Amino acid sequence: MDVKTGFFYLFSIVLLFAAFRVITARNPVHAVLYLMLAFSQASAVWLLLRAEFLAITLVLVYLGAVMVLFLFVVMMLDIDVDSMRRGFWKHFPLAAIIGVIIALEMTYVLMGGFRDAPQNVAAAAGQVANTKELGILLYTEYLFPLEIAAVILLVAMIAAIALTLRQRKDTKFVSVSDQVRVRARDRLNVVNVASTKPPVAPVAAEAEATPATPAPAATAEKKA
């Protein structure tokens, strides 16, 4: 066994362990971290297969953007794990049937792809550019599946935002539509208040406000 085969088995074992821990971890944050580990090992396997573009895309897009976003969303969500586990065994038969069907479909597709694959993958990869051939296949033969995948990712993003922005009892919620429809007369209400004191005459008010000053003659008499 050469060094390349040894690295392949090492990456594959870590990948299988991380994938198993994704579905068995009790903490959702730990499950996301194991999924990031699985993606990193998958990118290493792609490098061994000389698919450098797919490997770097897996690292930059999924590890660098998507999974980090999922990690922040999972950390922000207030997930009640105990309530989710109550209906686990109730839905387990249906989930097991769906899982078996998906596994059989993946086995059928992969075995068919392995039979049709060229014998010398390295020689075939050296003749053409990976990025160019991948782009031609994606936007010609696989354009419709690519658009479906984009729609699924969009729906997942909207669902994550909807779960994060749900109403909680400990937060305040302001309706944007109510703010847009507000009018000035709804904010200000003029009320006529009756006066509590009788009105004061203007002349009497000026006399009270201005102090009386003695005449000059009277001042002179006092000095004499």
Image (tube, rainbow, N blue to C red):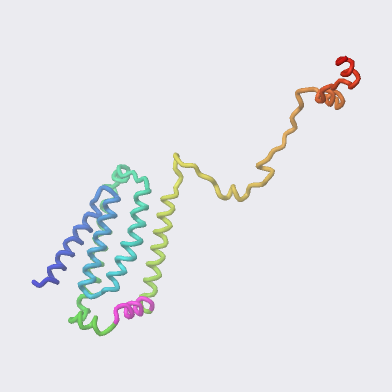
Residue sticking out furthest to the bottom: 127
The C terminus appears in which quarter of the rendering?
Answer: top right
Looking at the figure, which quarter contains the N terminus? bottom left
* Residue 5 shown left or right of residue 37 in the figure: left
Residue occupying the point 37% across, 67% down: 149
Magenta segment main secondary structure: helix
Left/right of residue 8 with respect to residue 203 in the rendered view: left
Between 203 and 167, the one lying in front of the other is 203
How far across and how far down the image is residue 27, in percent?
A: 27, 48
Q: Quadrant of residue 114?
A: bottom left
Q: Is residue 209 visible?
A: yes
Quarter of the image for residue 96 reads bottom left
Q: Does residue 138 belong to the magenta stretch?
A: yes
| Placement of 85 over or under 16, stated as above or below | above
Q: Residue at x 32, y 43 (%)?
A: 83
Measuring from the top left, give residue 172's x and y in whole percent.
Answer: 49, 42
Residue range (magenta): 129-139
